[in-house]
Amino acid sequence: MRAVLIEALEKQYEADIAAADAAIKLLLENSVAVSEHLNHQKELDCQIHKIASAEEKLQVLKDYVIPKGEAEQKSVYDSVTIGEKE
């Protein structure tokens, strides 16, 4: 059960990162799709904060929750990438 909860948290944080990354790309590459009333700089800062927070949580999970033996077997955490071009 412990491993299931840890994996669920990893996936949640990875999803948070992916969602914020998509929002940043949308803001930077397709600003027409965003409302004219939106403060772009503030929204970018908000999305960057979401990524930083999720990355920090993943690191804490890796450092303090996952035992060393499990950490070596986990490939899910190591596969997180931000901003890669497809």
Image (cartoon, rainbow, N blue to C red):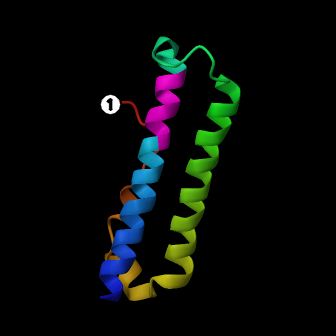
Q: How many marks?
A: 1
Magenta segment range? Answer: 20-27
Coordinates of residue 19 in the picture (x, y in percent): 43, 43
The residue that appears at 46% across and 25% down in the rendered structure is 26
Residue 7 visible? The answer is yes
User: Does residue 20 appear left or right of residue 77 in this picture?
Assistant: right
Classify the position of the N terminus by image quarter: bottom left
Query: What residue is disc 1 on?
Result: 86
| Residue count near mark 1 (Cα–Cα under 10 Å), binned few <14, some 14–19, many ≥20 | few
The residue that appears at 52% across and 31% down in the rendered structure is 24
User: Does residue 55 appear left or right of residue 15 in this picture?
Assistant: right
Residue 83 visible? The answer is no
Residue 21 falls inside the magenta stretch: yes
Residue 18 falls inside the magenta stretch: no
User: Does residue 11 appear left or right of residue 47 in this picture?
Assistant: left
Establish if 80 lies above or below 44. Answer: below
Establish if 6 lies above or below 13. Answer: below
Classify the position of the C terminus by image quarter: top left
User: Does residue 80 appear left or right of residue 38 in this picture?
Assistant: left
Establish if 37 lies above or below 64. Answer: above
Mark 1 belongs to which amino acid?
Glu
